[in-house]
Image (spheres, rainbow, N blue to C red):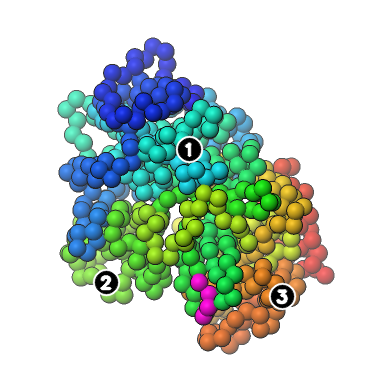
Amino acid sequence: MASTALPTPEQPRTSAPVTETSREAAPPSVRAWVDEIAALTTPDRIVWCTGSEDERQRLLDEMVLAGTLIALDPALRPGSYLARSDPDDVARVEDRTFICSRTADEAGPTNNWVDPEQMRSRLRDVFAGSMRGRTMYVVPFSMGPIGSPLAKFGVQITDSPYVVVSMGVMTRMGTTALERITEAAGWVPAVHSVGAPLVEGAVDVPWPCNATKYISHFPETREIWSFGSAYGGNALLAKKAFALRIASVIARDEGWLAEHMLILKVTNPRGRVFHAVAAFPSACGKTNLAMLRPTIPGWTVETIGDDIAWLAEDADGRLRAINPEAGFFGVAPDTSRSTNETAIETLWGNTIFTNVALDDNNDVWWEGMTDTVPDHLLDWRGADWTPSSSTPAAHPNSRFTVAAAQCPSIADDWDDPRGVVIDAIIFGGRRATNVPLVVEARDWEHGVYLGATISSERTAAAEGTLGELRRDPFAMVPFCGYNMADYWAHWLAVGESLQARGTAPRIFQVNWFRKGENGRFLWPGFGENSRVLAWILDRVDGTASAVDSPLGLMPAPGALNLDGLSLTEGARESLFEVDRASWIAEVDSTELFLEGFGSRVPAQLTDQLGELRSRLLG
């Protein structure tokens, strides 16, 4: 779809030379939009990206010459590169991320709202001439396998070759996607500039960016405008911006779900194949679960997606999911052979690392990667570093970008255009108290309540009051493109159809992080989480027993496989303990949380809250 034009009529259109032949294959609305953005940003050159390997290598070589990338040792890490960002451009900037819906109520209390016309005025100012002296790249892409009925298309404009190469990893990018974009199919326009024009005589820097940043979303017109940052979460507009913030609105309007969820394929010892999706806030082991290596015999786990899932009901009433992405954009620190061997094996080559350390062998390193810390490194800023240094060698939010197809645990149906049928939905947070190891929801409405009340306890003073709950419903607070209360109502509506046909997936809540009185974790986590996953899927299979509790259904004695697992005395009981007084206090807190959304909160959720209170008092 075409954008709402930002150039004013008196601005001249650019006469920048255009390369590649892809422009001729683009529908008229795409060509007209590209002309509008070129007139506004005035680049020196326009390149329509094809997604070819030659194009990718040419951009990589150019970035090495420019100092944006460092080529790693080809014997140790073939085809891989290190990028060092500007120290002020290292993460998503949530306070500069905006939902510009028609009204503040439509955005809801969890989003930063700005009036759309006011934001358009700001964007006209900052984007005017923002690409002077630079190349404007036109990047057509598909979210989802080419040919999938669940796939959606977009076109990103950017002046960052780092973004172009990364989009080639994270999406199905280039001519193949452009050929599928039609006026009837629709497409999402996404504009990005680092905001660092090269005026006459200006010298470029390895990582151009701007102190002023805007990551703006226009839900009604399906537009994304990002200015000032080259960091992935702000600049790879296919990822959080499209795949969640804009897609959640499209999904609401079209009757499907765009979710911050991993997708797993699991096969039990009897050969039955299951698929599950799981939503976890940050620092809750999401990537580790996506690449889980089971410790119990007979079970296998394969990866379909590590971050985002799009789910829709098929003709038979089953909920199917695709991974709309083609790559992983993962956090490096604490990724090791002991925590996630699959991820380490995925990163053998063809990877772009950002803000990790460089060792003396011209290879990468980060905190937690190895038991032995190197004697000398160049840190993420390029400065000398030793174990006695007072700052970390790798930035805590340092990243790797790598193709999903390179993952050794990737499932053979990970990019099936039909998607995979979902058997179970799992929610989890990081809770030291209260929340049991695993609970099964009684029904879909109860499951939506569990998802809506996901929370993690703050673990650092910088995050707020220690122990205070940081609520992140469905792990979607930073990513939902509209009012969260309306989002819950949409989940309930999707469930009505599935329940009417008897095809609704079972819903569960897990918590790997409960602690004992000594402050130590009660559950070992990592590969041992396969034991919990086995009980969940045995429940789906009808072969595992459960007992009721005020919170939901929990494993019956002996139903959770603990064979060969060394737990401390009383750990099993503590993992499932329900402290009624603590839970009543949590219900009071949840009631205040829901009240913050006003009258838009679905009655089903307030009913669930009341039922939980009654069961705790009963």
Q: Is residue 299 shown in magenta?
A: yes
From the viewer's perspective, is 588 left or right of 265?
right
Choose the circle earlier in sequence order: 3 or 2. 2
Residue 15 appears in view: yes
Local packing at callout 3 (Cα closer than 10 Å; few below 14, some 14-19, many 20+) is some
Camera-side residue of 287 and 282:
287
Verify CB contact (< 8 Å) between mark 3 and mark 2.
no
**176 to the left or right of 611:** left
Earlier sequence position, callout 1 versus callout 3: 1
**Label located before the other in sequence (1 or 2):** 1
Q: Is residue 231 above or below residue 23?
A: below
For mark 2, what is the residue? 373
Q: CA distance from mark 3 to mark 2?
A: 46 Å
- Callout 1 environment at 10 Å: few (<14), some (14 to 19), or many (20+)? many
Q: Secondary structure at mark 3?
A: strand
Q: Is residue 121 visible?
A: no
The magenta stretch spans residue 132:
no
Give the residue displayed 27% in from the left and 22% down from the top. Answer: 16
| Cα separation between marks 1 and 2 | 44 Å
The residue at which mark 3 appears reads as 546
Q: Which residue is mark 1?
A: 153
Q: Count the marks: how many? A: 3
Q: Amino acid at mark 3?
A: Ala
Quarter of the picture containing the C terminus is bottom right
The x, y position of residue 144, in whole percent, is 49, 46
Q: What are the residue bounds of the magenta stretch?
A: 296-300
Left or right: residue 113 compared with residue 488: left
Q: Residue at x 49, y 58 (%)?
A: 413
Taking the spot 34% from the left edge, 14% from the top edge, the residue there is: 12
How far separated are the C-alphas under marks 1 and 3?
44 Å
The three-letter amino acid code for the residue at tag 1 is: Phe
Other-residue count near label 2 (Cα within 10 Å), few / some / many at <14 / 14–19 / ≥20:
some
